Image: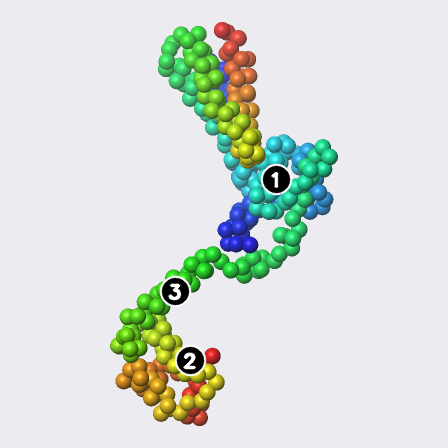
């Protein structure tokens, strides 16, 4: 279910008349006239609500002799609220793409054509992006001495001490017994 | 004319009250249908007021009202037929509510004012 579909479903369900129709259909399938009689509403009003319920997939219908029988879509209602909330959001994808483009822009402005870091960003969010790029120069699972770490970072920037400490502070590298490891 | 005005105003008040009660019960779409009904009665209250301004002659006022009783809902009937063609149940019900309210207006007009013609 997309975010748009979830919004449409919840909007549709936020109506007492439609909930009454659904409760009736949860007990048994029914046709418009039967629902009209049971709920004390005009058949046209029932049809109106059934159309809205049908549009969001809450009910389905099929012709049966002279009547159109309406059925509750149990598959939809068997879903948990949590599973709906955990669906990938359209907006989340847009946000991810926006984030990716912004990261690229930050990297372009702080690294030169040779891959050297021009300057250490003052803003923490930008600094973190730069440090993440530096961390990619280290192999996962391998232990590095401080000297090795300094040499690798020095390829990017002269202030390797600051950058090394920052990588540890930001949990991109771990330090134990004088050895550094990239945090996965 | 005054009697018809009172009748239509009472219908506006009743439908408005009903819409508010339905809204309070979280029956928003049903409340909106009642609002549509109230709007139709309200339109013809306005037509009556316009008729009173148009002329002081009772027959002319009545003719003005009757003309508008024909003219105003012509678009509603077309909209209803189109909704039926498209299978647009939601719109169809809305147009039906308007036409049902119109029938009530027409009946009230015939009973309370039309007989004097």
* Residue B33 can be seen, yes or no: no
Q: Earlier in the sequence, mark 1 or mark 2?
A: 1
The answer to which image quadrant residue B92 occupies is: top right
* Residue B63 can be seen, yes or no: yes
SS at badge 2: loop
Is disc 1 in the same subunit as disc 2? yes
Chain on which label 3 sits: A
Q: Which mark is residue A50?
A: 1
Q: Which mark is residue A171?
A: 2
SS at badge 3: helix
Residue found 55% across the figure and 30% down from its top = B85
SS at badge 1: helix
In x, y percent, where is residue B107?
A: 55, 16
Q: Earlier in the sequence, mark 1 or mark 3?
A: 1
Marks 2 and 3, how far apart at CA: 21 Å
**Front of the two marks 2 and 3:** 3
Above or below, A106 against B47 in this view is: below
Above or below, A38 against A156 in this view is: above
Chain on which label 1 sits: A
Chain on which label 2 sits: A
Dot 2: few (<14), some (14–19), or many (≥20) neighbours within 10 Å?
few
Of residues A78 and A129, the one nearer the viewer is A129
Above or below, A116 against B52 in this view is: below
Q: Which mark is residue A99?
A: 3
Marks 1 and 3, how far apart at CA: 42 Å
Q: Earlier in the sequence, mark 2 or mark 3?
A: 3
Q: Are marks 1 and 3 in contact (CB under 8 Å)?
A: no
Q: Are marks 2 and 3 in contact (CB under 8 Å)?
A: no
- B57 with respect to A60 (left or right): left
Residue found 47% across the figure and 79% down from its top = A184
In x, y percent, where is residue B12?
A: 49, 26
Residue found 47% across the figure and 14% down from its top = B66
């Amino acid at each position: 279910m997309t975010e748009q579909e979830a919004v449409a479903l919840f909007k549709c369900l936020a109506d007492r008349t439609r909930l009454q129709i659904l409760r009736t259909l949860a007990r048994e399938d029914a046709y418009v006239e039967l629902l009209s009689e049971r709920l004390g509403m005009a058949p046209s009003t029932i049809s109106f609500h059934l159309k809205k319920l049908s549009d969001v997939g809450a009910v389905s219908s099929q012709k049966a002799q002279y009547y159109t029988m309406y059925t509750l879509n149990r598959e939809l209602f068997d879903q948990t609220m949590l599973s709906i909330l955990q669906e990938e959001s359209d907006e989340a994808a847009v946000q991810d793409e926006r984030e990716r483009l912004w990261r690229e822009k930050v990297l372009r402005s702080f690294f030169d054509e040779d891959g050297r870091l021009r300057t250490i960003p003052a803003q923490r969010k930008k600094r973190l992006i730069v440090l993440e790029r530096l961390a990619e120069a280290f192999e996962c699972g391998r232990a590095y001495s401080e000297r090795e770490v300094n040499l690798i970072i020095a390829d990017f920037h002269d202030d390797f001490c600051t950058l090394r400490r920052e990588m540890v502070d930001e949990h991109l590298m771990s330090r134990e017994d004088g050895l550094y490891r990239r945090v996965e | 004319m005054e009697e018809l005005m009172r009748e239509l105003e009472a219908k506006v008040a009743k439908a408005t009250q009903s819409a508010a009660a339905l809204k309070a019960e979280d029956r928003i779409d049903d409340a909106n249908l009642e609002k549509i009904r109230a709007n139709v009665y309200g339109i013809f209250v306005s037509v009556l007021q316009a008729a009173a301004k148009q002329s002081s002659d009772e027959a002319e006022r009545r003719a003005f009202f009757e003309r508008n009783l024909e003219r105003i809902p012509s678009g509603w009937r077309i909209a209803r037929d189109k909704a039926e063609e498209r299978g647009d149940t939601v719109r169809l019900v809305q147009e039906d509510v308007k036409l049902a309210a119109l029938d009530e207006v027409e009946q009230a007009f015939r009973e309370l004012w039309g007989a004097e013609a």
